[in-house]
Amino acid sequence: DGGITQSPKYLFRKEGQNVTLSCEQNLNHDAMYWYRQDPGQGLRLIYYSQIVNDFQKGDIAEGYSVSREKKESFPLTVTSAQKNPTAFYLCASSIPDITNEKLFFGSGTQLSVL
Amino acid sequence: GDSVTQMEGPVTLSEEAFLTINCTYTATGYPSLFWYVQYPGEGLQLLLKATKADDKGSNKGFEATYRKETTSFHLEKGSVQVSDSAVYFCALSGGGADGLTFGKGTHLIIQP
């Protein structure tokens, strides 16, 4: 079955450590997105990519980095510069024009600070 | 910029009650409008959508009508079930490359 796989489900970060969240899709979608979800805050866009080897900052990109070396993969690195990383992180994908189409979401990664 | 405002939760109802979750939006042009649902510990799933004024989206007994004159897209269901307990997000697409703009979500709790 086609879909988006995020791993790990739960991740713990120590102070000063970088951690990488994985996102893989087999839907053949060009566009991929990373959102951060905090209680009562809804979803906020971190980074997005419309095509391989290209990505753009979203609303809250500071302290995060991404790469898009393959169409299927869009990993997110939470760097030590992100001072408040505890949140639920959601990856999504779609065809480039989503005016009439939906986003497909992964099941998320819960990141916590030790 | 674009924005979506939803009624704050949690919203607690008894089984078989009528549900309304309000959603209003601000956008330039003519956005598409969506309702997504999130069950505990999971990602979001599309519930329904509407792409132009006066369109009605419907799915699983839920409905929402795109009202351009009031810039609203309220979610309704005539008789809720315990299994409808989840967080509901209203969202819009302005057609840009940066995906959807989401509201803050409304936590719905249905008691038996």
Image (cartoon, rainbow, N blue to C red):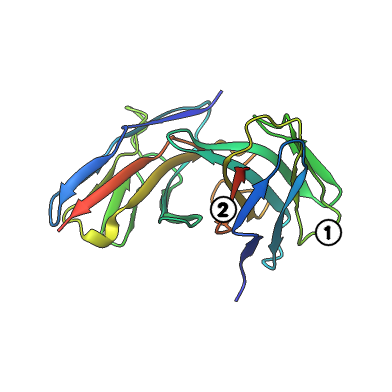
Image position, residue A70 (x, y; %): 83, 59
Tag 2: residue type? Leu
Image position, residue A14 (x, y; %): 70, 42
Callout 2 secondary element: loop
Viewer-closest of B31 and B76: B76
Chain ID of residue with mark 1:
A
Q: Which mark is residue A103?
A: 2
**Residue projecting furthest to the bottom:** A1
Q: Is residue B89 above or below residue B6?
A: below
Residue for badge 1: A70
Q: State which quarter of the image contains the C terminus of chain A.
A: top right
Q: Residue at image x 64%, y 54%? A: A93
Q: Residues within 10 Å of mark 1 (few under 14, many from 20)?
A: few
Residue A110 placement, left or right of B10: right
Callout 1 secondary element: loop
Q: Residue at image x 64%, y 64%? A: A5
Tag 1: residue type? Lys
Counting residues from the start of the chain, the first of labels 2 and 1 encountered is: 1
Q: Residue at image x 79%, y 59%? A: A71
